[in-house]
Image: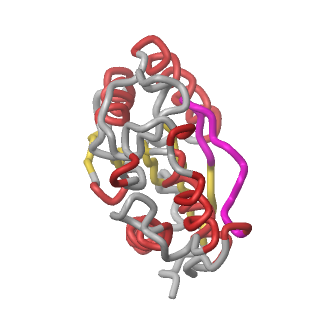
């Protein structure tokens, strides 16, 4: 089995209740630095070797955390991957969730897998691009003590990866299948995967 650690960015500097998928903004720097320290402490408790590199969403709240991790472990490279960005909510980006019409949310819920909420990207679009990164990481993993992969990313990506892992590389069909367990800002999830590319 291979292991992938998925680390969520720290608290973003945006009004609470805002729909902000790919909207770019920084995160709280103090929280970011604290998250970086906590992550490496947890990592060192389990692994002697450092990861070869960090895979990172190009959105600045994630790059900020990636750079904070690098300041502590300067020999770990940072590789940006656009497939690890958050879901694109299109015309609803930057709008308060309370101001999104109920009809738009209902349509998304009813056609959760394939409806592009906001007109740009569906949940299965998100799962598909996250699955590509997942399979690439699994394909190059080795059972010889090589350090696991680390992703610096977003809540939606972490849920998509969780679904990809538990489903064996399948697309989602219904809203009630979507993982509900939240990953708080600055925290992480560890997921295991069979050392094969999913279908």
Viewer-proximal residue among 51 and 137: 137
Seen from the viewer's position, the closer of residues 107 and 35 is: 107
Q: In which quarter of the image is the N terminus?
A: bottom right
Instruction: Locate residue 31, reporting x and y percent.
Output: 49, 17
Residue most extreme to the top: 30
Residue at coordinates 45% horizontally, 61% vertically from top-left?
117
Task: Give percent across and percent down for residue 10.
Answer: 48, 27
Residue located at (47% from left, 42% from top): 49
Whether residue 148 sits left or right of residue 172 in the image: it is left
Secondary structure character of the magenta stretch overall: loop
Residue bounds of the magenta highlight: 177-189
Task: Please report the residue visible at 52 percent of the width from the left and 59 percent of the height from the top.
Answer: 104
Query: Could you tell me residue 53's position as x and y percent?
Result: 33, 46
Q: Is residue 10 left or right of residue 118?
A: right
Taking depth in this image into account, of 106 and 24 the one nearest to the observer is 106
Query: In the image, is residue 33 above or below residue 124?
Result: above
- The question of residue 70 being in magenta is answered with no
């Amino acid at each position: 089995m291979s292991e992938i650690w998925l680390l969520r960015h720290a608290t973003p500097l945006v009004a609470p209740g805002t729909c902000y998928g790919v909207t770019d903004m920084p995160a709280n720097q103090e929280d970011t630095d604290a998250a970086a320290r906590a992550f490496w402490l947890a990592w060192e408790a389990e692994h002697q070797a450092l990861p070869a590199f960090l895979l990172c969403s190009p959105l600045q709240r994630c790059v900020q955390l990636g750079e904070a991790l690098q300041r502590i472990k300067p020999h770990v490279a940072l590789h940006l991957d656009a497939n690890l960005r958050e879901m694109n909510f299109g015309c609803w980006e930057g709008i308060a969730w309370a101001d999104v019409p109920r009809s738009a949310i209902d349509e998304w819920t009813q056609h959760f897998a394939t409806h592009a909420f906001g007109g740009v990207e569906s949940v299965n679009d998100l799962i598909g691009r996250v699955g590509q990164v997942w399979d690439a990481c699994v394909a190059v993993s080795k059972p010889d003590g090589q350090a696991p992969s680390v992703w610096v990313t977003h809540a939606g990506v972490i849920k998509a990866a969780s679904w990809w892992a538990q489903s064996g590389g399948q697309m989602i069909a219904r809203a009630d299948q979507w993982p509900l367990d939240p990953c708080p800002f600055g925290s992480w999830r560890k997921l295991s995967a069979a050392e094969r590319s999913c279908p």
